[in-house]
Amino acid sequence: MDPMQVKIALVGKYTNLSDSYLSVVKALLHASVACSQKPSIQWVSASDLEDATAASAPDAHTKAWETLKGSSCILIPGGFGDRGISGMILAAKYARENKVPYLGICLGMQISVIEMSRHVLGLGNADSEEFNTDTPDCVVMYMPEVSKTHLGNTMRLGCRRTFFRKPDCLTSKLYGNPPHVDERHRHRYEVNPSFVPMLENAGLQFVGCDESGNRMEIVELQDHPFYIGVQFHPEFKSRPRKPSPPFTGLILAATERMRTLTNVSNGDAGASE
Ligand SMILES: NC(=O)CC[C@H](N)C(=O)O
């Protein structure tokens, strides 16, 4: 394998329509070039990771897991609707437990919150109101100011400011330690603030929020080399000569993991220089 190639598992719903993720693909390219790497995107259809696929299409299930496990990092991009959600939760769990670098964008951040709530807090029915309106553990909720009766104009859109709640967090460092960042948004649901203290006790830190202090914008998992979720879409502001910091962080972490794994498989892990 080309040593400069970094394999990124992109776990999504529209993986056979790669143009749906064009901005994410470009942002990965910009960040990889800045790190002197070549991105190799490994498309993983989220529903292929699910247990139901093991029964209905075992080859697709095996291949999806092999692709996920053979990648140096995992990215879950934005998305809408419930298809593939359980597969995304499995991918986020795999990244958390196996310390694989993870970047969750918008839906990808909401997936991290659901995954941690279910598997670490033990709230088995934890869900987003987008997928289950009746769950008692609604860890991701419809944004209160968004109308439930109007279908148009209900999204929180455009450039918004995120303030760092924990100024020494990894995401702030990646951006060069500013007090806040301005990134673009496109969502209807948000983390339910009443679950934040429990999740923080369990190790998921909410390191960025909006000006109200109640709307969570960035999560970071403690005791993990790189696990970041952002409610905004950093890919929209990525440019060839100005890569997006969360993407650069992901590629750097993936490269480091690739090196470690290569050294381990060559039997020289821990060898002195
Ligand atoms: N852009 C997205 O990923 C949106 C996430 C989720 N469907 C929401 O509306 O909040």
Image (cartoon, rainbow, N blue to C red):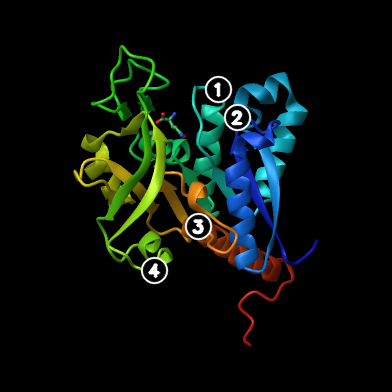
**In the drawing, what numbered circle is on residue 244?**
3
Q: Residues within 10 Å of mark 3 (few under 14, many from 20)?
A: many
Query: In the image, what residue type sits under mark 1?
Result: Arg
Lower sequence index among marks 3 and 2: 2
Q: Is residue 226 left or right of residue 152?
A: right
Query: In the image, what residue type sits under mark 3?
Result: Ser
Residue 203: x %, y % from top left: 33, 51
Q: Which residue is mark 1?
A: 83
The residues tagged by marks 1 and 4 sit, at their Cα atoms, a distance apart of 37 Å
State whether residue 273 appears in this view. Answer: yes
Q: Which residue is mark 4?
A: 176
The residues tagged by marks 2 and 4 sit, at their Cα atoms, a distance apart of 33 Å
Q: Quadrant of ligand 1?
A: top left
Q: Is residue 270 left or right of residue 147?
A: right
Q: Identify the residue at horizontal 74%, vertical 23% (top origin).
A: 57
Observer-side mark, 3 or 1, equals: 3
Lower sequence index among marks 1 and 4: 1
The residues tagged by marks 3 and 1 sit, at their Cα atoms, a distance apart of 28 Å
Contact between marks 2 and 1 (CB within 8 A): the answer is yes
Q: Which residue is mark 2?
A: 13
Relative vertical location of residue 261 with respect to residue 112 in this rendering, above or below: below
Relative vertical location of residue 98 with respect to residue 59 in this rendering, above or below: below
- Determine whether the residue tagged by mark 2 lies in a helix, strand or loop: loop
State whether residue 73 appears in this view. Answer: no
